Each structure stands twice: as C-alpha cells, then as structure tokens.
Image (spheres, rainbow, N blue to C red):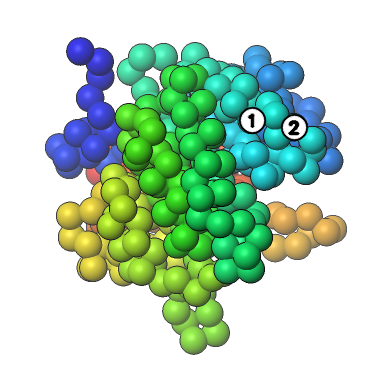
Amino acid sequence: MGKQRITDVLKTGKVMVSDGAWGTMLYQKGLQPGECPDEWSLTHPAEVEDIAREYIAAGADMVETNSFGANGYKLAHYGLQDKAAAINEAAARASRLAAGNDRYVIASAGPTGKLLLMGDVTDDDLYACFKEQVTALERGGADAVCIETMSDAGEAIAAIRAAKENTRLEIIATFTFEKTAQGEFRTMMGLSPVEAAGRALAVGADVVGANCGNGMERMVEITKEIRAAFPDAYILIHANAGLPAQVDGKDVFPETPGMMAALVQPLIAAGANIIGGCCGTTPAHIEAIKNAVRNL
Ligand SMILES: [Zn+2]
C-alpha cells in the first residue's frame, strides 16, 4: 500500500499546505532572462530539486514541479517541443526526490497560450498536448497534476480529460481571476469562480480553486463564492504575496510572510482546504502559512 491520496487526507478535515513561487527561485539560482525555465529540469536538475527541497523544509505537505510552461506549444517558442516528454519527466523526478515518500508532488501544467476561441487550436489538439505532458509527469513520479492559471474553460477541460483518461493522477484545476470595475471576479475569458469551478468539477477535477492574480484578502472572497456553490468540493488556493506594484519596471509583491499568515484563519473559515503561494511568495511565506495552519 502506498500513502493516502490527497483527497483522502482532505476528507479527514485536515488543511494542507502547498508550496510557493518557482520562477523567482529559478532566477535566484541563475536562470537568465530569455532562457526556457522548464528546460532547467534537464540541464540543472540539482538546482530544480533544491527549490522543491526548500519548500519541503519550510513545511509544505506538497510541492509543485518546474513544468508550468512544459507543454508542446510553449516549448515550441524555444524549439524544444520534441523534448516535452523528457522535460516533464525530469521535472516530476526532481520534485519526487525532494518530497520523498510521505509528501506529495502536484505537478504543474499551465496554459498553452493557444486560444480555442480564436481557432488557434482544436479541443483535440489541446487534449493531445496535455496528454503528452501529464503522462510524462506521472512517469516521473507525480501524485497529482495541478492544472493552473487557467482562464478558458475549454482549455482546462481538455487538460482535465487528458489526465483523467490517461493517468491515475489526482486532478487539481485552478483558474486565475481579476476583480472587475463592477467588483466581480472573472477570468480573462469571462468566467466567474463558480462557473470555472463548476465546469472543472463536472469533468472530474478532484480539487478546484484559484491561483495567482490576487493576494490572500481577495482569495478569501473567491473561496467564499466557490464554497457557497459547492459545499462538498475541495478547494486549493495559491495566493500571490499581494497585488504587485511596479518598481523600476519590476513587479514587487508587498505582502510579507506575517501578513499572509494573518489571513490564513479567514481563508480556512471561507472554505479553503489547501493553502499555498503563487507569485512573490518564498519558502519564508510557506513556513509562516504552515505555522498559522498548525496553530489553528
Ligand atoms: Zn502567480
């Protein structure tokens, strides 16, 4: 018998902690602007494993993988589309080594950048692309796939179906929302949190939620909306360290570990089951979130 599935742990009422940002950490380790971050799993496996290790050491129950842009369409920008399988397998392997047997690897799968609505690709194209990615992530040792930063239901559905029909991975699907002038949360393609979660759950996502785009405070509002519509769903939130301010042309994220940790209690009260970070978060943020969860 292996370890419990993530959803079996959540069923007991336990709140789990996920990891934080990867991009910033890769740059800290020497990734150059214009370089393909995902290729680092092949060329710099030790550095990639180190990032996962830092989050595990901070107390994360699960870590993502360096595969956010490792789909064939994104890799084609670097001429690396033929290496998609190898890159994803290596990414999962690095996080697996860091996570050991008792923590979880939730492998990242981000958007392709291709729009169904514009006729760039068909559903079948997206399905095939995600099938290649998720099957490689499973071979590398992932426990789950975290389909994230989604804005289009069609693309998310293609990714969820590809995972559901070709792997045994648990499926997490999170969307990115912005607050409109009318004060409503919508993805870039116009989906509300309830519509997005509903579409994902309908095709078999095990966990739904939101990542990026918002700090903890707005994630509390988004979580409340999803929880009210889906009382039994499992919800994952990967919040940014606040809303970025532009300083010298760079995004600077204002929320400290303590500021994020202070909003853990309201986020759990709103209905979050898994809490982690997105842009601007570091192992220090995750450690503070872990302590806040433990102290509740
Ligand atoms: Zn982000």
Q: Quadrant location of the C terminus? A: top left
Image spot of residue 175 (x, y percent): 47, 58
The residue lying at 46 percent from left, 20 percent from top is 139
Whole-angstrom CA distance, mark 2 to mark 1, is 7 Å
Viewer-proximal residue among 98 and 281: 98
Q: Which circle marks residue 84 in the picture?
A: 1
Q: What type is the residue that disc 2 sits on?
A: Leu
Viewer-proximal residue among 62 and 121: 121
Viewer-proximal residue among 60 and 149: 149
Q: Quadrant location of the N terminus? A: top left
Q: Label 2, on which residue?
A: 80
Quarter of the rendering containing residue 82:
top right
Q: What type is the residue that disc 1 sits on?
A: Ala
Badge 2 vs badge 1, beta-carbon distance below 8 Å? yes
Q: Secondary structure at mark 2?
A: loop
Image spot of residue 234 (x, y percent): 26, 49
Crowd rating for badge 2 (residues with CA inside 10 Å; few <14, some 14–19, many 20+): some
The residue lying at 43 percent from left, 33 percent from top is 106
Question: Residue farthest to the left?
Answer: 12
Q: Secondary structure at mark 1?
A: helix
The residue lying at 73 percent from left, 19 percent from top is 43
Image spot of residue 224 (x, y percent): 30, 66
Crowd rating for badge 1 (residues with CA inside 10 Å; few <14, some 14–19, many 20+): many
Quarter of the rendering containing residue 289:
top left
Relative to 48, is 169 above or below? below
Image spot of residue 291 (x, y percent): 37, 36
Relative to 112, is 76 above or below? above
Image-based side of 277 in relation to 83, left or right: left
